[in-house]
Image (tube, grey):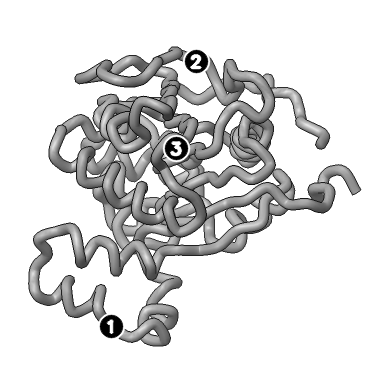
Amino acid sequence: MSVTAPPTSEPVERQPHAILDRESRLLKARKIARLVERVRPVEAASLLDIGAGSGYIASALAELAGPEGRVAAVDVNDQRRTNEGYEFVQVDGTELPFEDGSFDVVLSNHVIEHVGEPSDQLHHLQEVRRVLRPEGVCYLAVPNRWGLVEPHFRLPFLSWVPRRLADPYVRAAHRGTHYDCLLPTRGRAERLFAQAGFEHEEVTIAAMRVYRELEDLSLPVRLLCAAPAPVLRLLQPANPTMIFLLRPTVKAPESDR
């Protein structure tokens, strides 16, 4: 596999957008585990959480992995509220400080939109593939560019507008000085997966079923999550979040051909 060098362009100042409350992060860990276990057990697995944030997800997954498992976490900022049960490394950029094939499971939970330009996003995915074992799986969640409300700044259509207009929009709304996220479309995300050497399965609808089981949702949301799959597939273009399970491809990635 050919891995590109980390981009060297001048980086945009990126803000921490981590969610730090305990209860929502513990619930998120349970959802992630349920989806990952469609492919492989979490118990006794070696897991890497990219973008540790509060640390609650890594800590909860360490409990699920059990004494025979291992959980590591990385982040460019140290905002942890707990350090129980996992190892932590602070990083700078998209390079991962681990040997090839170190992990059974890698989590990239709302991370890829924060790492930079498309070349940075590709390098992020290539690093994930490098540290995954051949039979491993990556859980990747990312906001949909065509979601009606941008989830980090809570502004309608922010991710839709041309990039030159995004910063003035953020400033006019008094939400900061600049827009530092790059949300992909579904098509762009899928092309990046292929370039990095992954095959993918979108599990957004499966995730909605899991949310219905685990969360105390309002009645309209519960009914939506219970809708027939063909209906939900029709609504997918406007779904605010896309969730994928990535597996290393057997054939060479597109960048090697």
Check disc 3 and report the residue beneath it: 111
Residue at image point 28% right, 63% down: 210
Quarter occupied by the N terminus? top right
Q: Is residue 143 left or right of residue 28?
A: right
Q: Is residue 219 left or right of residue 92?
A: left
Say which quarter of the image contains residue 119.
top right
Q: Amino acid at mark 1?
A: Ala
Label 3 crowding class (10 Å Cα cut-off): few <14, some 14-19, many 20+? many
Q: Which mark is residue 227?
A: 1
Q: Which of 175/229 is in front?
A: 229
Count of all numbered marks drawn on residues in the image: 3
Check disc 2 and report the residue beneath it: 91
Work out whether residue 17 can be spotted: no
Q: Earlier in the sequence, mark 2 or mark 1?
A: 2
Residue 33 image offset from top left, x and y in percent: 35, 47
Say which quarter of the image contains residue 10.
top right
Residue at image point 24% right, 29% down: 56
Q: Cα distance, mark 2 to mark 1?
A: 41 Å
Residue at image point 30% right, 49% down: 151
Q: Cα distance, mark 3 to mark 1?
A: 29 Å
Q: Earlier in the sequence, mark 2 or mark 3?
A: 2
In this rendering, the answer to whether 156 lies above or below 176 is below
